[in-house]
């Protein structure tokens, strides 16, 4: 479309459609005719993309979602974002938040987070689960800093050799 100056908005949609169909060639036109009626250029592009585009498998996407655990060094917020991205492809519908929450609890690499979230009642929301997990992660990180600072303040025993 760019090469023939047909990519501007003032070009007739029918003309764009005709050029696209011409460029498909005989075999492409045969396939296009089997896809049904497409009166506009956008309809043609959508039908062709759905026909030739990659097939999406909900089963495969759900498998990938269930297999995805939190990686060592990965923050809870980053893990949560990744789970959201995967869940969007899984067609969980109204169960999306519950599935993400379950996955967060089952596959976190921090036992303290898992234990704390399991102590929550069944009314635990995804928002509360991620907030608690982030608070625990921050507290654990802070406690390591405090512990290492305390260790560096302890005096080293001086060994004196008496002669």
Image (cartoon, grey):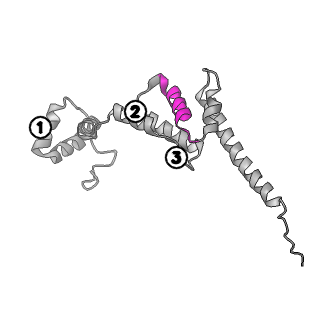
User: How packed is label 3: few (under 14 Cα within 10 Å), some, or many (20 or more)?
Assistant: few
The residue indicated by pointer 3 is 71
The residue lying furthest to the right in this view is 163
Badge 2 marks a residue whose secondary structure is helix
Instruction: Choose top left, top right, bottom left or bottom right for residue 62.
Output: top left
Looking at marks 1 and 3 on the same chain, the residue that comes earlier in the sequence is marked by 1
Looking at marks 2 and 3 on the same chain, the residue that comes earlier in the sequence is marked by 2
The residue lying furthest to the left in this view is 26
Up-down relation of residue 163 to residue 69 (above or below): below
Determine the residue positioned at 78% across, 57% down.
Answer: 151
- Give residue 14's position: percent from left, percent from top: 23, 39
- Give residue 80's position: percent from left, percent from top: 55, 39
Q: Which mark is residue 127?
A: none
Q: Which of 126 and 3 is in front in this view?
A: 126
Q: Distance between the residues labelled 2 and 3?
A: 19 Å
Q: How far apart are marks 1 and 3 (CA)?
A: 49 Å
Q: Viewed as shown, does residue 2 lie left or right of 125? A: left
- Give residue 76's position: percent from left, percent from top: 59, 42
The residue lying furthest to the front in this view is 163
Point out the stretch of residues depicted in magenta: 94-109
Determine the residue positioned at 15% across, 37% down.
Answer: 31
* Chief SS of the magenta region: helix
- Nearer the viewer's eye, disc 2 or disc 3? 3
Up-down relation of residue 89 to residue 16 (above or below): above
The residue indicated by pointer 1 is 30
Location of the C terminus (image quadrant):
bottom right
Q: Distance between the residues labelled 2 and 1?
A: 35 Å
The residue indicated by pointer 2 is 62
- Nearer the viewer's eye, disc 1 or disc 3? 3
Badge 1 marks a residue whose secondary structure is helix
């Amino acid at each position: 479309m760019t090469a023939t100056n047909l990519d501007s908005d003032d070009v007739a949609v029918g003309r764009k459609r005709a050029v696209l169909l011409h460029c498909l060639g005989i075999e492409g036109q045969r396939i296009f005719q089997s896809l049904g009626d497409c009166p506009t250029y956008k309809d043609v592009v959508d039908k062709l993309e759905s026909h030739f585009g990659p097939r999406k498998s909900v089963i495969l996407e759900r498998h990938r979602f269930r297999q995805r655990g939190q990686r060592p060094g990965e923050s809870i917020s980053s893990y949560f974002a990744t789970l959201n991205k995967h869940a969007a492809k899984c067609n969980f519908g109204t169960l999306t938040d519950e599935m993400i929450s379950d996955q967060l609890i089952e596959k976190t690499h921090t036992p303290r987070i898992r234990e704390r979230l399991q102590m929550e009642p069944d009314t635990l929301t995804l928002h509360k689960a991620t907030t608690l997990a982030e608070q625990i992660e921050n507290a654990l990180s802070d406690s390591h800093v405090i512990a290492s600072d305390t260790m560096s303040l302890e005096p080293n025993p001086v060994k004196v050799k008496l002669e």
